[in-house]
């Protein structure tokens, strides 16, 4: 082999190596942004979970080891109640949002006049921020000028105005209704998009075979919506478990901790109590719970697998 051919082969290999690195150079800025705003904060939370870190008492700050985690499971009287409240919150929210979102999606998938306008109106709650939604529902629940008290009194259901957000018997239900109104459009949007991808030929064939609407829904619609339902319920479970804005603005976790979810407990403890070490340990527990749930859920539901 001549020196010229050898030199050409070296240049080709060098160019090939450079070309292999070009895609990584393009994704490098995105990776740096993700590392800065995602991986670094996560790593910081894990680090502080093993520390006694209270900004109101810096002279007590030191390495704690597993003390924070031991305290959570042995001495924290609010951890398990807040975890159970989170469970009730997630199950009620995701379940009801899925049911009503599916109903709305099926209705909005039909052909009728002003369908585009109705779809836009139905999706408005999803576009409203949590703070604005909190203010709206706080005013509607208001004991003195709220629309709910006015309607219920005119219907004769109640005889005097009720403080829905200040009662332990009604606060949780009131917050669930408010979040339900805001969350239904998420399922409606995603399920409607999935419904529109189902071939009409399948429904025509089922009509020819004599299947009624319910049978077509069970054997055609739901199987095609399976992956969408699995993904949306998983995403919504994570979001609702970590939901804090609406609960914080409406009740702050009260009254008497009746609406204190685990995330709300962490927010009150870390932000208001300034105990970031213990709050970080609770956050790590929450992360692990969600991670295990996601893995098990995807395994059980056989996501993206054919039955």
Image (cartoon, grey):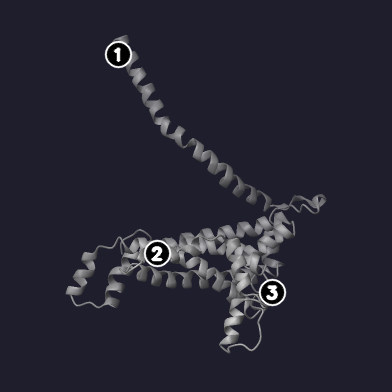
Query: What's the CA distance linking mark 3 and mark 2?
Result: 40 Å
Q: Label 2: state its secondary structure.
A: helix
Q: Residue at x 64, y 89 (%)?
A: 159
Q: Earlier in the sequence, mark 3 or mark 2?
A: 2
* Nearer to us: label 3 or label 1: 3
Q: Is residue 299 visible?
A: no
The x and y percentages for residue 140 are 60, 73
Q: Which mark is residue 255?
A: 3
> What is the crowding at mark 3: few (fewer than 14 residues within 10 Å), some, or many (at least 20)?
some
Q: Helix or strand or loop: what does disc 1 sit on?
A: helix
Which percent across, then down, holds residue 268? Answer: 70, 62
- Kindly identify which numbered label has been placed on residue 5: 1
Indicate the quadrant containing the N terminus: top left, top right, bottom left or bottom right.
top left
**Alpha carbons under labels 1 and 2: distance apart:** 69 Å
The label nearer to you, 1 versus 2, is 2
Let me know if residue 202 appears in the view: yes
| Sequence-first tag of 3 and 1 | 1
């Amino acid at each position: 082999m001549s020196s010229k051919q050898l030199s050409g082969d070296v240049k080709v290999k060098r160019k090939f190596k450079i070309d292999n690195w070009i895609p990584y150079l393009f994704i490098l800025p995105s990776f740096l942004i993700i590392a800065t705003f995602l991986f670094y904060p996560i790593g910081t939370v894990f680090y502080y979970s093993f520390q006694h870190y209270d900004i109101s008492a810096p002279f007590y700050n030191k390495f704690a080891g597993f003390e924070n985690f031991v305290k959570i499971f042995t001495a924290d009287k609010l951890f398990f109640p807040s975890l159970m409240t989170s469970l009730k919150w997630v199950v009620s929210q995701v379940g009801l949002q899925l049911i009503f979102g599916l109903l709305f999606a099926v209705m909005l998938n039909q052909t009728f006049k002003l369908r585009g306008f109705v779809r836009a109106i139905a999706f408005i709650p999803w576009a409203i921020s949590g703070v604005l939604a909190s203010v709206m529902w706080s005013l509607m629940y208001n004991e003195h000028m709220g629309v709910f008290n006015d309607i219920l009194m005119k219907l004769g259901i109640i005889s005097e105005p009720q403080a829905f957000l200040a009662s332990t018997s009604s606060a949780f239900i009131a917050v669930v209704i408010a979040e339900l109104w805001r969350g239904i459009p998420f399922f409606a949007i995603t399920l409607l998009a999935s419904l529109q991808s189902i071939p009409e030929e399948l429904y025509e064939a089922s009509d020819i075979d004599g299947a009624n609407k319910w049978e077509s829904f069970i054997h055609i619609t739901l199987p095609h919506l399976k992956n969408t339902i699995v993904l949306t319920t998983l995403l919504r479970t994570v979001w609702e478990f970590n939901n804090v804005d609406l609960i914080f603005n409406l009740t702050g976790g009260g009254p008497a901790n009746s609406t204190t979810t685990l995330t709300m407990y962490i927010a009150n403890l870390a932000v208001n109590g300034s105990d970031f070490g213990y709050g970080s340990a609770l956050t790590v527990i929450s992360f692990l719970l969600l991670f295990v749930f996601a893995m098990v859920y995807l395994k059980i539901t056989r996501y993206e697998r054919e039955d």
